Amino acid sequence: MASATSSEPVHHIALTLSDQLPALQVLIPFVAAPLMVFIGVRSLAWPIAFLASLASLVISVLLLQRVIGGSEISYHMGGWAPPLGIEYRVDAANAFVLLLISAISSVVLAYARGSLKAEVPEKNHTLFYALYLLCLTGLLGVVITGDAFNVFVFLEISSLSTYVLIAQGSYRDKRALTASYNYLIMGTIGATFFVIGIGFLYMATGTLNMADLAERISEQRDSRTIRAAFAFIVVGIGLKAAIYPLHLWLPNAYTYAPSPVSAFLAGTATKMAIYVLLRFMFTVFQPEFLADIKILEAVIIPFALIAMFAASISAFYQRDIKRMLAHSSVAQLGYMLLGIGFFSHTGLTATIIHLFNHGITKAALFMGAGCFVFAVGATSYEKLKGLGKTMPWTSAAMVIGGMSLVGIPGTAGFVSKWVLVQAAFENGWWGFAFLIVLSSIIAVAYVWRMIETLYLSAPTEGVTAKEAPLSMLIPLCLMALSTIYFGFATDITLSASKAAASGLLSGSSGLH
Amino acid sequence: MRHHLILRVITKLLVGTIFLFALYVQFHGDYSPGGGFQAGVIMAVGFIIYGIVFTLEKVKAVFPPWLVHKVVALGVLIYAGTGIYSLFYGYGYLDYAAIDPHHPVHGQHLGILIVELGVGVTVTGVMVAVYYAFAARAPSLSDEDW
Amino acid sequence: MFEEMTVEFILGHLNYWFFILLMMTGLYVVIAKGNLVKKIVGLNIFQTSVFMLYISTGKVEGGTAPIFPMDMKIDPEMIYSNPLPHVLILTAIVVGIATTSLGLALIIRIREEYHTIEEHEIAEQETKISLAELNGDQLISGGNS
């Protein structure tokens, strides 16, 4: 910052609107949230929220267009240059995740208007949308920032609003409160672990800027402080990302949260955490460091495999559609971790593309589950029997989502599993390719159970269902169709994921 | 509380002083220890002590819950608004130089003052809101308030 | 690594020992106690340990408060403590307050719905609800507030 004290005008090149995009990305939802509370007119809350979300979607598209070629944008908060100031850094990897988060947020918000009326009392709606936008702010902020401590701050903004959003489910089922409380305890422990890790990094290097950290860590890779920092950060983010043994908060939280919240979180929150994990592993700590400490072989791959199987099997035994989807989320996170474990460009591409594809798939499925809540007030299989006839559109969307979850060719899920299997072949790890296919077969089993319930069972007596209103069906079908669209138009997501993987690996020489 | 004459008199005397001290801490923040967070909490203490001594209804008459919510939002808007102001002048977000381009240091003084004011307003609101939420477990916001 | 464990090493890193002690106390309380309020207390102790870790690293021996004199005549001999950890921890403290008040608010709501704040009693009630759902009974857990 130029802090000249003379009265001469200080030379300053004015920033144009397009230079301000990285700040606006986070700023628009952040300002819209208090604005709607300040205005306090309930009928305006949803339009403001929706417009803000759409605006950040447009911005994320513009940002991705600018960085997909491999360039980077650096935005200096308050005019303070990094590494002293806080820097927002956009490259292909986080622009892609920004796009995912703001896109899912916009579609889910369109859907939330109808769904929320059935699940949350009207007087809470203004604050609900405000918190939703704050959660969006937090998620976008975590992804866009280039400052390690800033990640913690945004992480807590998104987490704190998430806890409240989940607790709003208590109007439907009181267990939402305990689910939210448990998530609060686990999430806070996770965030605190993360901040301890950042503290160790700061002690060892004296900086908080990610690019600067990467440089200084590579000079002292053997330092015990750095290694302790890495352990704390991985466990902390692992709690947020629901990596297999740390996932216990997730099923209850997703099951009892209001449906739009489940859809939003399932599509974005764990994805954001996986992105942070990738960013810290590959940009801040560098692949060479990972190879040194053998974390991939010792931790990531084993837990990824356990997640793929154990969580899939427990998904099969669930009797509630939302709970089944939640367990399946943990299993799908296993695939993303496996992609990291392959430790190659293709593996990372698989992780990032699965992050996107699974995000839209799960959002579609949870939105479908929300339509069931709207129609019959419950999501247990018992109540959903035979709904395929009375709710044809919702059920069809659920089937499409389920197929994408399994990875049937022609859906988005297939693309990411294909890349993952390719990565396994590239490494010559044939067994892993087999295990990926095997776990997909378990996915077939639990998805089939859902389809069987919806189409082949006789309706439970006393359950009358009507198709959900169009305001919910259109976003749902849009999301379901997009899983098919991205199953065919693979070049968009693939090129973005490849650019993202290259961006993450750009600082290192070990991988290409 | 009808009997605690001394408590009531002292509280009445104290509340004004507490507010004054809060404002002192608020606006002296850039020369000495202090700032929005501390000032906000001290300001909220004024309301809370009034509520403890003279019942919740009395303090809610002074600072109604709907106003608390607006104040919370207002503070964040002041804070973010300062940043947005600099966007319009072609500076980065929260670049205080935009407030006085000829004198960036003056701009910084003014900028941090306004931002801290926003922080103080929000912290006051949040602390009072937390107190209301815990002290009155009846729904404090009626349906019409929104 | 044990040859490093001299008296100087142990006494010289006293802040870290206390950090570990507090951190473990906090984590233990969070994990071992069944009372929801006590868990929040444990969480607070845990977070406080981190504040201590950060702030103690900002201390420079012989350093003073990093406030420049008004005339900006800075004595090059002067040693200042590092203010950055304090600033970071100010943010973390605010986050901690938000977490605590949100947790306590949730506990109030839990108590209103479950009439207890003991973890095992809540778990019992939830098992009952799940079993009832399993047997196809009407939902007995419908919200009521």
Image (cartoon, coloured by chain):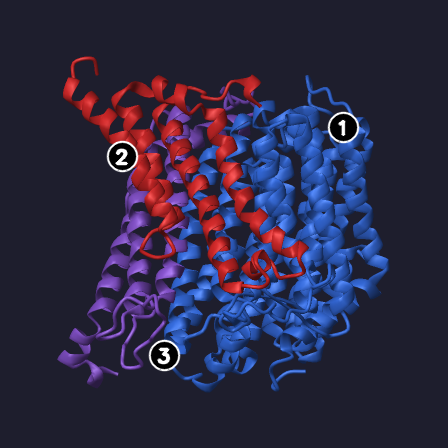
- Front of the two marks 1 and 3: 3
Residue A468 is labelled as 1
Element type where label 3 sits in the image: helix
Give the colour in which the image draws chain B. Answer: red
Left or right: A229 with respect to A400? left
Q: Quadrant of residue A493?
A: bottom right
Task: Give A159 or B115, whichever is nearer the viewer.
Answer: B115
**Residue A214, image x, y percentages:** 52, 78
**If the image is split into quadrants, where does the N terminus of chain A sit?**
bottom right
Circle 1/circle 2 CB separation < 8 Å: no
What colour is chain C?
A: purple
Q: Secondary structure at mark 1?
A: loop
Q: Is residue A134 above or below residue A453?
A: below
At 29% across and 48% down in the image, what residue appears? Answer: C42
- Mark 2, other Cα within 10 Å: few <14 / some 14–19 / many ≥20: few
Asked which quadrant contains residue C75, the reply is: bottom left
Query: Crowding at label 1, few (<14), some or many (≥20) Cα neighbours within 10 Å?
Result: many
- Residue at the spot of label 3: A224
Pointer 1 or 3: first along the chain = 3
Q: Whole-Å distance between the Cαs marked 1 and 2?
A: 59 Å
